[in-house]
Amino acid sequence: MVDEYLAAVVAHDPRRLPLARRVKFTEMGQRLELGDGFWHTASGVGHYRHYFPDPEAGQIGFIGTMREYGNLVLMALRLRVERRKISEIETVFYRKGSGPAWNDAGMDRLDSDGRVDPIWLASIPPAERMSRAQLAYTANLYFVGLQNNDGKGIDGKGFYPFARDCLRVENGVQTTSNPALIPNLPAGAFNYFGLDCAQQFESGYLAVVTRIHHRRFMAIDPEHGTVFAFAVFDQAGTTSVRLADGRVIPMPVFNHPSSILLAEAFKIENGSIRRIEAVGTSVPYHMSAGWESSTVTPDARAATESHAERAR
């Protein structure tokens, strides 16, 4: 279905798709008529294709590269399929030049090699698989720990739901455990990108994210331990951040009210997040995502086995 959708977009012809009678379509949180927006400007499909299927719920997420007038675009897509017909379509884009230069270089890498990290594709042994509720709950803990982050842990005792080898890729670039991402930092300078997933949260630097709303956990795959989610990150605006160790770090970005609309995927094993992949771009402050806040409500009671008990 995803491949059919991409081919139809490049052909600028939604009539090629098996569509439900009433189709809801959004691009960057805005509801459009199907065939509008990127449908006008798409010129090709890139090499990178990462699928997040959920046959039980009839949902599939996708992160991949596309071409727009020959230029590279990173696209996140969600389709809802009912009775073999597409009833919902949701898209988020990151375009070259719309963010830091290192994002653009990462997009080129994704497009050139076309390979998905094999950890994402590995099946979870049946005896170790988490329920859909447990997976959604664990993915939501990422947002819980990120919103108004203070470095003290979700429980106030330092707990964050990350595996030791957790890596995150944002707009095509590895943004954890990557100390060389920002070159020529002065000696002793705070290097956020050099920290691993847990260390970044423990630092308190992510306090810039003051609210995360319209959280939706759309495609959940217990076989592979993956969750494909959407959310909007609000930054109320600040000129500095006080780290957990007391240092005050100037904030040259996010220093005015702004938001990021993003699709974010999680690979979860044994109750811990091992991989994160996100596509996001700036949108007006506190913008709606164009959909209801939640389709799956993370249930703490249904997920009690997924954290401390599994760790013990």
Image: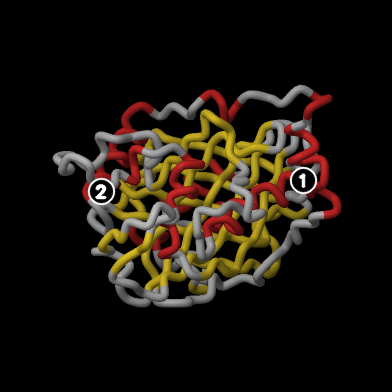
Q: Which mark is residue 71?
A: 2
Specify the quadrant of the image occupied by residue 25.
bottom right
Please state the horizontal and vertical placement of residue 223, each as a whole percent of the image.
74, 32
Q: Amino acid at mark 2?
A: Asn
Please state the horizontal and vertical placement of residue 297, each as a whole percent of the image.
76, 61
Please state the horizontal and vertical placement of residue 155, each as a whole percent of the image.
66, 54
Residue depicted at x 35% and y 40%: 173
Residue depicted at x 78% and y 37%: 130
Q: Amino acid at mark 1?
A: Gln
Q: Nearer the viewer, mark 2 or mark 1?
A: 1
- Above or below — where is 26 with respect to 185? below
Number of on-image labels: 2
Specify the quadrant of the image occupied by residue 54.
top right
| Viewer-nearest residue: 91 or 155 | 155
Residue 79 appears in view? no
| Viewer-nearest residue: 68 or 289 | 289
Q: Give the secondary structure at mark 2.
A: strand
Left-right relation of 77 to 307: left
Residue that badge 1 annotates: 134
Mark 2, residues whose alpha carbon is within 10 Å: few (<14), some, or many (≥20)? few
Badge 2 vs badge 1, beta-carbon distance below 8 Å:
no
Residue 271 appears in view? yes
- Above or below — where is 140 with respect to 265? below
- Above or below — where is 297 with respect to 107? below
Please state the horizontal and vertical placement of residue 153, each as a whole percent of the image.
59, 52
Upstream in the sequence, badge 2 or badge 1? 2
Left-right relation of 55 to 272: right
Mark 1, residues whose alpha carbon is within 10 Å: few (<14), some, or many (≥20)? many
